[in-house]
Image: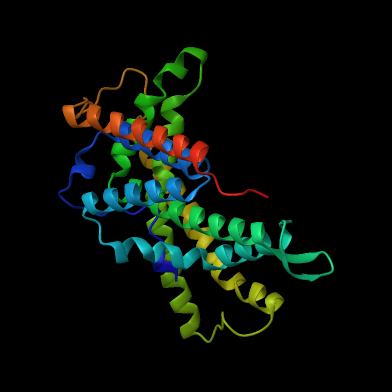
Amino acid sequence: MIRDITIGQFYPADSVIHKLDPRVKLFATMIYIIALFVFKGILGLGIITLFLAGIIRMSKVPFKFMTKGLKAIVLLLIITSVFNLLATPGDIVFWKWGSLQITDKGIINSVLMTIRLVYLILGTSLMTLTTTPNQLTDGLETALKPLNKINVPVHSIAMMMSIALRFIPILIEETDKIMKAQMARGADFESGNLIQKAKSMVPLLVPLFVSAFRRAEDLAMAMEARCYNGGEGRTKMKPLKYGKCDYISYGVVVGFLVLVIVAAVLLPFPQG
């Protein structure tokens, strides 16, 4: 389960998506998230599905590798689906017990929210799988550069996000090692009730936090030893430059959002 988390990992491949400017991918991800919560009908769902499927195919990232990230949120998906199913009022009631009920609109909302969460994980994972942490940092810093005029520490924010993304796979691997070591010493993380399971996580969390703080301290000392002082006056080995494909991608993404909005107006689902 721990190794199934794909967010923060980079999958090397020779694809059009990998070669795009990171600013384009950040913009496309933001538009994609907006579209996910704007669509209201079967036409909009179809447009988003075709768009996501096309991007995944163009990225050359194996679909099985991407879907591994869904295993970590199965419980969240179930809770969200059940909550929407039982707590949404509607015109047609199929089952009712006290304040809980299953209605036509509840079924629609439950299915839509599950689809939105699945698509959200797949879409955001695709950005990190096709973009290195360095590229994400450069893209985010360049995109937010105008905020420097109002004294927002853009470089520091971008650096912190880059370091956080780099630490995700490292901490996942560290967690897996500690868990196996504790299980070899007789630790049981599966049996027992909720309170017992929470107590059994203490031998895992304590060394994990110690390791994380130690890595953070080592990184801070290394940056200080190299006289790192932020983005003031720093140059880049590979400055970001837009190409023809990047401009085309911007147009495709904007067109995609327009289609989703138009579809939401023309053929919406009945809403609760």
Q: Residue 75 versus residue 255: which sits nearer the camera?
A: 255
Tell me which residue sits at (42%, 24%) in the image: 144
Farthest residue in the right direction? 98
How is colour applied across the structure in the image?
Answer: rainbow
Q: In the visual, does 97 lie left or right of 259?
A: right
Q: Residue 34 versus residue 216: which sits nearer the camera?
A: 34
Residue 238 sits above or below residue 63 on the image: above
Q: What is the x, y in percent for residue 141?
A: 37, 28
Q: Residue 73 versus residue 216: which sits nearer the camera?
A: 73
Q: Quadrant of residue 82?
A: bottom right
Tell me which residue sits at (66%, 74%) in the image: 199
Tell me which residue sits at (19%, 40%) in the image: 19
Residue 13 sits above or below residue 3 on the image: above
Q: In the visual, does 246 lie left or right of 40?
A: left
Can residue 91 be seen in the rendering of this structure? yes
Q: Quadrant of residue 78?
A: bottom right
Q: What is the x, y in percent for residue 105?
A: 65, 56
Q: What is the x, y in percent for residue 42?
A: 47, 51
Q: Residue 264 versus residue 30: which sits nearer the camera?
A: 264
Can residue 173 be seen in the rendering of this structure? no
